[in-house]
């Protein structure tokens, strides 16, 4: 594993120094060789999405918090405000009631999440049995865990959780000063490797600019994720949330987001790469999405109409879903060996 980690670190360092245009072109060629010409468009129902191409429907994929609006960490970028838009279900019995009612109304699936307790994990262990009931009812269930112990990981695996989402951090100061956790970057690496060992499907997230808009530990996080071999890799960017210490912070510039996406594509040529839903709206959004497409992403959450049109212009056919973007891997198949050979000259 040490040799692999060293090799990954060398690849990151080498590619970070390359001119952006050449880096992005390389990433696009890898994407074009490895994956079929499709672009996933994810629009789960926590956000209304109506465009000329697709409209989502209320209640088709929901976010549920097992802690209600409570979070012990009160991270500087969120302060628990993201929990306010989730459906509260603070006991296993309530989670079953909520899930079954949603299923009767045509809900496809749910993200089970919540606020973190001290130590950086969401207290999902007591809810594993309830999650199993929701899976048996037909709901697609993914879980946002934070750091996690083996017993909880095994319980979630046995419950049938389809995927685990974890925000990965690679900078000690960010962990302490933004997340207020007495943890270190290797704790995230250990959690990733342990969850893979247990057999959970991983969709790690990297939040660019988490340290007050600066890129600090994101590439180390990418190293850990690449070592673990995830089923999907989701990249998001700092969003200014009113009432938080980062409400006036400038997110990372679009070229830096594009660079990270391109390096991620190069290091993970077989892994669905996704530009997730958390990113700052505004005048830079079109350029960000266009650069993400050029850098080889397989899916984008809530893209602009013009971004879908741009993808079509690059030869990609859009595939729409009302489920979470991290679940799009199965809808975005890789090329076969023969198809790769045919496309190698493109």
Image (cartoon, grey):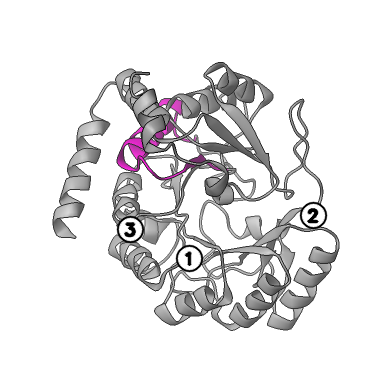
Q: Residue furthest front?
A: 338
Q: Residue at x 32, y 53 (%)?
A: 171
Q: Are marks 2 and 1 in contact (CB under 8 Å)?
A: no
Of residue 8 and residue 211, the one placed in the foreground of this image is: 8
Q: Residues within 10 Å of mark 2 (few under 14, many from 20)?
A: some
Which residue sits at x=50%, y=34%? Answer: 250
Q: Which residue is mark 2?
A: 59
Residue 339 in percent (x, y) is at 41, 31
Q: Which residue matches tag 1?
A: 146
Q: Is residue 137 left or right of residue 242?
A: right
Element type at mark 1: loop
Q: Position of residue 56 (x, y in %)?
A: 77, 42
Count neighbours of disc 3 (C-alpha within 10 A) and say few if under 14, some if 14 to 19, many if 20 or more: many
Quarter of image, res 340: top left
Q: Hey, which quadrant is residue 130 in on the image?
A: bottom right
Residue 274: within the magenta? yes
Q: Earlier in the sequence, mark 3 or mark 2?
A: 2
Specify whether 286 is left or right of 270: right
Q: CA distance from mark 3 to mark 2?
A: 33 Å
Q: Secondary structure at mark 3?
A: helix
Q: Is residue 53 visible?
A: yes
Image point 52% across, 23% down: which residue? 290
In the image, the segment drawn in magenta is 251-276
The image quadrant where one finds the C terminus is top left
Can you see residue 256? no
Q: x%, y% of residue 144?
A: 54, 63
Q: Does 260 lie within the magenta span? A: yes
What is the number of callouts on the image? 3
**Residue 135 appears left or right of 316:** right
- Residue 228 is labelled as 3
The single residue placed furthest to the right in the displayed view is 105
């Amino acid at each position: 594993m040490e040799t692999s980690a060293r090799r990954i670190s060398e690849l990151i360092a080498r590619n970070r120094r390359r001119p952006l245009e050449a880096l992005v072109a390389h990433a696009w060629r890898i994407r074009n060789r490895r994956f079929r010409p499709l672009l996933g468009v994810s629009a789960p129902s926590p956000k209304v999405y109506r465009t000329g191409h697709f409209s989502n429907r209320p209640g088709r994929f929901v976010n549920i918090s097992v802690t209600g609006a409570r979070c012990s960490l009160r991270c500087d970028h969120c302060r628990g405000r993201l929990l306010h838009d989730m459906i509260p279900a603070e006991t296993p019995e309530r989670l079953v009631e909520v899930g079954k009612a949603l299923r009767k109304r045509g809900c496809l699936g749910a993200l089970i999440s919540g606020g973190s307790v001290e130590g950086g994990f969401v207290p999902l262990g007591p809810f594993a049995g309830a999650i199993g009931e929701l899976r048996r009812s037909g709901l697609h269930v993914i879980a946002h865990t934070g750091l996690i112990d083996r017993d909880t990981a095994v319980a979630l695996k046995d419950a049938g959780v389809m995927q685990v989402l974890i925000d990965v951090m690679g900078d000690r100061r960010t962990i302490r000063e933004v997340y207020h956790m007495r943890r270190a970057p290797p704790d995230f690496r250990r959690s990733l490797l342990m969850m893979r060992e247990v057999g959970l499907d991983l969709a790690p997230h990297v939040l660019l600019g988490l340290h007050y808009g600066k890129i600090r530990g994101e590439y180390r996080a990418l190293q850990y994720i690449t070592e673990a071999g995830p089923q999907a890799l989701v990249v998001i960017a700092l969003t200014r949330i009113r009432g938080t210490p980062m409400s006036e912070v400038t997110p990372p510039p679009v070229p830096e987001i594009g660079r990270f996406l391109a390096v991620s594509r190069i290091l993970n040529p077989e892994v669905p790469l996704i530009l997730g839903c958390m990113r700052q709206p505004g005048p830079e959004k079109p350029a960000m999405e266009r650069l993400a497409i050029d850098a080889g992403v397989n899916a984008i959450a809530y893209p602009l109409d013009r971004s879908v049109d741009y993808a079509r212009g690059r030869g990609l056919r859009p595939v729409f879903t009302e489920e979470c973007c991290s679940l799009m891997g199965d809808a975005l198949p890789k090329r076969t060996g023969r198809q790769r050979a045919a496309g190698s000259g493109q």
